[in-house]
Image: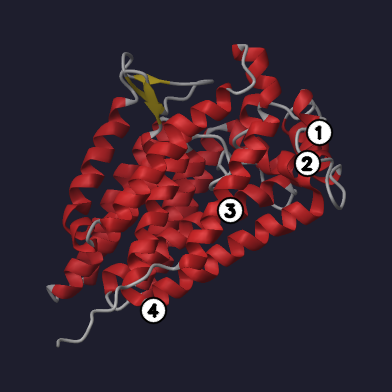
Amino acid sequence: MPPREISKQPDYILLGVCSILIVLGILILSSVSATLSQEKFGSTFYFLNHQLKFGLIPGIALCFLSFKINLSWFKKWAPFLLLINLILLSLVFFPKVGSGFRGTARWLNIGPISFQPAELLKITLILYWASWWTSRTEKKIKNPNLSLAVFLIIMILVSLFLIFQPDISTLGVIFFIATLIYFLANTPLWHSILIVLIGLGGFFSLIKLAPYRAARFLVFFNPETDPMGIGYQIKQALITVGSGGISGKGLGLSGQKFGFLPNLPESISDSIFALFAEETGFIGSFILIFLFLTFFWRAFKIASSSKDKFSQLLAAGISSWIILQAFVNIGSMIGILPLTGIPLPFISYGGSALISELIGVGILLNISKQTN
């Protein structure tokens, strides 16, 4: 008899960590969004239902699909997926299908569905760069300067889309991940240094062109320069985090959600960690951070154990994206980083972000079953 084939198993620790994070996200969202939901829509469960219908359910379906699809399919179709994403990004500027909020143009409306193409760009661009570098390695194309030129042209195009929305926070995340993948692809070190310098130059230029961005950094170092604006947001975020104490006030017992934390709609997305810390305290916050560190450990293990270049770059890009967003979001809420509009993975309100993150998890689990 032929030897029995041993089925490859995914990384169950990673799956368990992501499941716990999602459950925590649903629990805290149902707790902190009830007041705002009742005030705006006459139902305490509007935001929760919206997150389930347009975030979690389709996200789990796409996560399972990403887990089952052969990785070679992603490698083959990555350029096409990026092209579709760029087309969707351009459509947000058209009046009938695009929509904005407070001077931005970030959402695309297709029937009853509204989503942010920039969130999906994080995963499609990671797929593209992993596929592109692998194909160049396999074809033994050795022209590093041409590779650098192609990289810069595509990143400039992507940057222009995000600058005009504007969504500089997302641009920062995408630029960091793309540069990391470029570095990991065994390119000349001076290329990576040049890309970082170009990125920093562009970043400071964008700050100079928009005074409100410069204000965020100035207030970060001295909140008293804008005590009723950004400085007030920073102080209230710190008060919210600190008021949780050791064990927290308990789910549903946050006081800051009743208008003390500014920009309440954003408080269930960008600032949700502060409310999470208030209701669950230091213990809950420690557990949440531990879960993200465990996620990074397992994802890094998957990347380092991968047997092919495509899987290595893909896993490294996805794990860096998730942990970078978690670090920046939490850091901005505890005062070690300036305030940004970056959501907390798996926890923040926002269907587009949750869907893209779950697609990334599905791909990571897909890679893990090739390495276990």
Q: Are marks 4 and 1 in contact (CB under 8 Å)?
A: no
Q: As rendered, which of 89 and 222 lies closer to the eye?
A: 89
Which of the two discs, 4 and 1, sits closer to the camera? 1
First in residue order: circle 3 vs circle 4:
3
User: Spatial distance from mark 2 to mark 1, Cα to Cα?
Assistant: 6 Å
User: Spatial distance from mark 4 to mark 1, Cα to Cα?
Assistant: 44 Å
First in residue order: circle 4 vs circle 1:
1
Q: Which mark is residue 305?
A: 4
What amino acid is labelled 1 in the image? Leu
First in residue order: circle 3 vs circle 1:
3
Which structural element holds mark 4? helix
User: Which residue is label 1 attached to?
Assistant: 253
Q: Are marks 2 and 1 in contact (CB under 8 Å)?
A: yes
Residue name at image x 28 percent, y 39 percent? 85
Left or right, 41 with reference to 173: right
First in residue order: circle 3 vs circle 2:
3
As drawn, 180 above or below 347? below
User: Spatial distance from mark 3 to mark 2, Cα to Cα?
Assistant: 17 Å
